[in-house]
Amino acid sequence: MKVLGLSFGKKNANCDILTKEALFGAREAFPSAEIKFINTQRLTIDRCIGCGACSTALEKGKDNKCIVKDDFQMVEEEIRSADAIILAAPVYVLQPVGQFKNMVDRFSCRHDVSAINWVLDKRRTGEMPGNADDYPMDRLRTRTVSYISVGGAVTDDWTSMGTASLHLFGFPAMMNVVANYNANGMGHVGNPYIDDELIGHMHEIGKRTAEAYGKDKKDIEFYGPKGMGTCPTCHQNLLTVDGTTRVTCPICGIHGTIAIDGEKLTVEFSEQEQARARGTFAGLREHTTEIQSFGSICGPKIMANKEMLDKMMDERIKKFDETINA
Ligand SMILES: Cc1cc2nc3c(=O)[nH]c(=O)nc-3n(C[C@H](O)[C@H](O)[C@H](O)COP(=O)(O)O)c2cc1C
């Protein structure tokens, strides 16, 4: 059992403190567990440059490595070999700090279970080169993760997209989410130590995250000390509305129906919708299929207009540089 603590906060500050307390909890449950802690603040994790080299390599029968070389590779290897992960990030302007998003863009897309499986299926039938057994998919799908969002604000109003955004890290890799916690009121370094209840929750999160490793998603009970949330799959409270009673969970991409009874609001998400949430194989496959169809729909149109498009691109860039950018 390997438990990884990943903190995107300042060194020895509140994200570190909370992650380490969760790791103490994991150690209490599994005295012989290998425990690793990484603080990312001084690491270089540059942005995804959108080059597509990773997916092209995969389709050519190679590993889908990221060609931007920095500290990302070390962190990725630690994540790959971890069974249970505790991830904490500070809220900077309502959302997790930017470095976390760099990590998500470079890690999570490349570990999309459906996209990788699509290629592995093609390797099995010989349509694409490479060994189909290169990826330990079954093990990867039983990994667990818990999220801790850390903000200085004393109410949830200024940490509103913290925990929700943290969920973007593990859903493409189909990690099983055990818990999330919105730790607000953390404006001063050391704040967690004056809140015994908070420290208790961190130990419980660490313990449960380690204990849930290897279990089937349906056998894992979500731990939500601050509530179970509106969405039954990600347990978040964010909803987008379209002016009707239909609402969408922006994290899971599933639709529900809103009902109001006096002061009480409920949202009904059908079993069918829950089964196509983004963090399920079916939900990820919907998007893989969508992406694959871009080529067949746009490809012929682009090829038919290629000469005109190339000319127009050159002309518009030249015009912009000579006029607006001059
Ligand atoms: C640039 C910046 C923006 C911040 N924005 C928010 C915010 O929108 N909401 C909030 O609750 N805290 C905000 N904070 C406070 C931090 O989330 C808080 O201090 C947290 O404890 C930092 O984590 P750390 O102690 O692990 O570094 C901000 C801090 C910085 C430096």
Image (cartoon, rainbow, N blue to C red):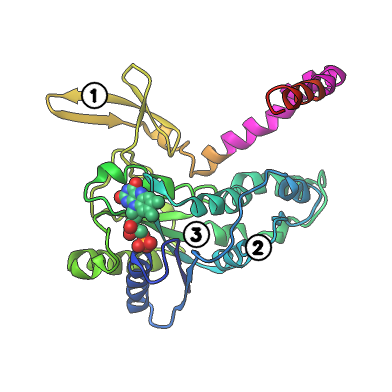
Amino acid type, residue under disc 1 in the picture = Ala
| Amino acid type assigned to the residue bearing label 2 in the image | Asp
Task: Give the number of the disc on residue 70.
Answer: 2
* Helix, strand or loop for disc 2: loop
Q: Ligand 1: give its quadrant.
A: bottom left
In this picture, residue 258 sits left or right of residue 126: left
| Residue 241 percent coordinates (x, y) | 36, 24
Look at the image and say whether residue 93 sits in the magenta stretch.
Answer: no
Residue drawn 38% across the image and 19% down it: 242
Find the magenta span and give its range: 285-313
The answer to whether 2 is drawn above or below residue 224 in the figure is below
Residue that carries the numbered disc 3 in the rendered image: 142
Distance, label 3 to label 1, CA atoms, is 35 Å
Measured as percent of width and height from the top left, residue 285 is found at: 59, 38
Mark 3 or 1: the one toward you: 1
Between discs 2 and 3, the one toward the N terminus: 2
Q: Residue furthest front?
A: 326
User: Which numbered tag is attached to residue 259?
Assistant: 1
Q: Quadrant of residue 284?
A: top right
